[in-house]
Image: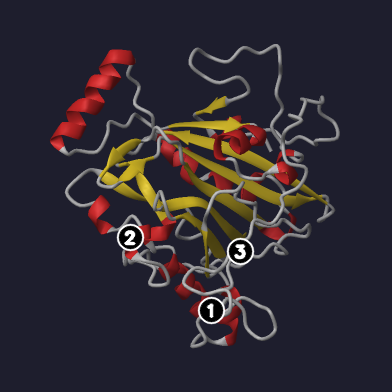
Amino acid sequence: MTSTDPADRPHTGQPADLPADLGDSPRVPAGLSDADATDADGTAAYDSSLSDPEAQAAAGYDPEFLAVRVPLPGSGGREVRDLPYVHFSVLLDPARRLPALTAVNIDGADPVDLERGDDWHLDERIPESEQAGPEIYARNDLDRGHQVRRRDPVWGEPSVASRANLDTFTYTNCAPQAAEFNQSKELWLGLEDQVLTYADAHRLRVSVFTGPVLQPDDAPYRGIRIPRLFYKIVVWAVDRGAALRAAGYVLDQSPQLDGIDLEAAFAQTHEAGDPPPLGPYRTFQVPIRDIAELTRLELAQLAAVDSLQTVPTVQPPDGVRFGWVPLTENDQLTF
């Protein structure tokens, strides 16, 4: 496992068309009209029945959580529903019925250990027709893949942590994933922990952006399309809070089939009403600028502090995109 300083590594060349800043895409909290979206003081309205600490935490992702401000990335012009929860937010794509982005603040110094639970539920603030609910996962081998990990926002006062735990089981915070579990998936699920353990994160705090890569050619199933790729960007402060560092990852569940075999497999599953074929999980550390290209999210601030070094003379394995590092062990991670 290595740690790098952006100031010391060779310049890798940032694309000229990457946005100059994150921007602020216009977003109205879901379920609220423009008039109702804010309280008298201009802050976002939320559930008034919550206690003060809960209400503050339920305002969603906090861009001031780290020592350096990290705004919620812009959606790149995509229409999204802005859904705040306790210690995290979801930007939901209502057309795809899946999250385009989730953003969570993790306080590794103040965790609360709670039982997992399994109370999956719809978000009542938006129409059911905009959510991929229980019907997607019935009578098949698809997993409800948490985008914000269950335990990531579960910190702080007990009542706040309990509310956060429940919020992670909202259908807006999941996407269909292959049920098969392998070493690469295990590595993916532990990336946040590795950063907290090895990256010398300031005050043991990190922010994480996660979501499916929503591509137009994703295979249809029960009124939605099943993503093949997922991304994750972990952000933390270094140098006693004076600077940022970030690392980007992609989880690939594409079927490992070629040409006519893949086409035939899709046709067969579609005719039978089964989920499209999915392959074994593969995890990569990737340049954040590539995640920006894949998702159209506005990630310039994070791409500028990417910890991944690209080495032009190193050729990737067959079938792997240039600059993508296949990961099978924790010690391959670069911080």
Q: Which quadrant: the N terminus?
A: top right
Residue 46's label in the rendered image is: 1
Identity of the amino acid at label 3? Tyr
Is residue 117 something that shows in the picture? no
> Comparing marks 1 and 3, which lies closer to the viewer?
1
Q: CA distance from mark 2 to mark 3?
A: 25 Å
Q: Which residue is mark 3?
A: 61
What is the secondary structure assignment of the residue under circle 2? helix
Please name whichever residue, 230 or 333, is drawn nearer the observer in this view of the structure. 230
In terms of sequence position, does the residue under pointer 2 or pointer 3 come before the other? 3
Q: Which residue is mark 2?
A: 129
Q: Residue at x 33, y 60 (%)?
A: 129
In the rendered image, residue 88, in percent from the top left (x then y), is placed at 55, 63
Q: Residue at x 56, y 37 (%)?
A: 249
Q: Quadrant of residue 9?
A: top right
Q: Residues within 10 Å of mark 1 (few under 14, many from 20)?
A: some
Please name whichever residue, 292 or 33, is drawn nearer the observer in this view of the structure. 33
Q: Are marks 2 and 1 in contact (CB under 8 Å)?
A: no
What is the secondary structure assignment of the residue under circle 3? loop
Q: Which quadrant: the C terminus?
A: top right
Q: Residue at x 59, y 62 (%)?
A: 27
In the rendered image, residue 252, in percent from the top left (x then y), is placed at 44, 32
> Comparing marks 2 and 1, which lies closer to the viewer?
2
In terms of sequence position, does the residue under pointer 2 or pointer 1 come before the other? 1
Q: CA distance from mark 2 to mark 1?
A: 22 Å
Q: CA distance from mark 1 to mark 3?
A: 14 Å
Q: Residues within 10 Å of mark 2 (few under 14, many from 20)?
A: few
Q: Residues within 10 Å of mark 3 (few under 14, many from 20)?
A: many
Identity of the amino acid at label 1? Tyr
